[in-house]
Amino acid sequence: MFETLSDRLDKVFSGLRGKGRLTEADIDATAREIRIALLEADVALPVVRTFIAAVKERARGAEVSQALNPAQQVIKIVNEELVEILGGETRRLRYAKQSPTVIMLAGLQGAGKTTLAGKLGRWLKAQGHTPLLVAADLQRPNAVNQLSIVAGQAGVDVYAPEPGNGVGDPIRVAADSIEHARRTMHDVVVVDTAGRLGIDAELMAQAAGIRDVVQPDETLFVVDAMIGQDAVTTAEAFRDGVGFSGVVLTKLDGDARGGAALSVRYVTGQPIMFASTGEKLTDFDVFHPERMASRILG
Ligand code: GDP
């Protein structure tokens, strides 16, 4: 996803190689080039501004170092600021003190929520949990079926309305699922919710209704990293309409420019917690800001 950005940054840094010391003009020119590279990668403007200001300030204040030449020093600063913009520390899932832990998934249709439910189910099971996937997406005719399929692949249980009864009330299904999980000793409930192609008031109200009855320990906003700048507006709409405690970036395997991935944490103030990198259930991992930064810097 970050090939173009990586190439651009690499060129910026090569321009600094061989320099004995960085002048003010070098720092300005480098900052300008990094700015262009980030904007071309579709990173949101406020994020770019903050990033560049931080890099410039630190580059100016950098001590002349025995160990690092100026190019290495700038790479180090850019790396550290990338980690910062991506959230700093890895943010782990918070489990409820009393089972079940409830994780609600929210996002646009096609973002990858149902696939993510399967991935999370598989991942939770591998961590020793007994997850229950809940089909509270009753909007899309095939969603219940699709969730049952991924649950089967993940080897975890699913809670869904009976076939033929798929037009039921998702809020009711979600509420009942928690009771069901308690009775059946599932310790983590993953609630898949309906998404629409665009943001709409009804979708937000339904998601907020589900949130109110299940009282999630984590609400994960699932966003397709391929949608570029739209990711930011979508994230803001979900933050205001439903609220969320973490972000899952999907389709990081795509060839989009990756700016969404770099913007969403800063814009929403919520950490990126997981990343999806393909259609298979194994294409999934905890999000590590420092690994992502290293990947961008090549
Ligand atoms: P939902 O509408 O949010 O539930 O989205 P789905 O889970 O149905 O996913 C929509 C499409 O995106 C499906 O074809 C998935 O296989 C695909 N998909 C989901 N996650 C990823 C990912 O990380 N990478 C790629 N390449 N495709 C994905």
Image: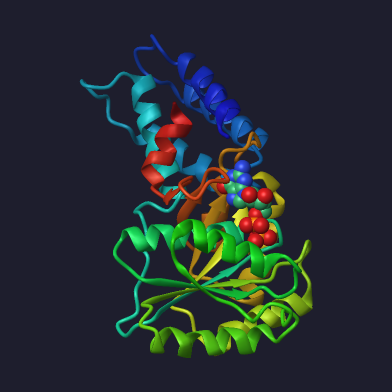
Q: Residue at x 67, y 33 (%)?
A: 40
- Residue 35: x and y in percent read 59, 34
- Residue 280: x and y in percent read 53, 46
> Does 106 sit left or right of 165 as displayed?
left
| Total count of labels | 0
Please say which color scheme the image uses. Answer: rainbow
Depth check: give the residue in front, 36 or 249.
249
Depth check: give the residue in front, 289 or 166.
166
The residue sitting at the top extreme is: 18
The residue sitting at the left extreme is: 66
Q: Residue at x 27, y 30 (%)?
A: 63
- Residue 190: x and y in percent read 49, 72
Q: Residue at x 30, y 82 (%)?
A: 97
Instruction: Answer whether residue 144 is visible to the viewer in this image.
Output: yes
Q: Quadrant of residue 20?
A: top left
Q: Quadrant of the C terminus?
A: top left
Q: Residue at x 27, y 24 (%)?
A: 64
Classify 61 as above or below 168.
Answer: above
Q: Quadrant of residue 78?
A: top left
Q: Quadrant of the N terminus?
A: top right
Classify 233 as above or below 211.
Answer: above
Instruction: Answer whether residue 247 is visible to the viewer in this image.
Output: no
> Does 161 sit left or right of 181 as displayed?
right
Classify 175 as above or below 297.
Answer: below
The residue sitting at the front extreme is: 163
- Residue 4: x and y in percent read 60, 26
> Does 196 sit left or right of 87 as displayed?
right
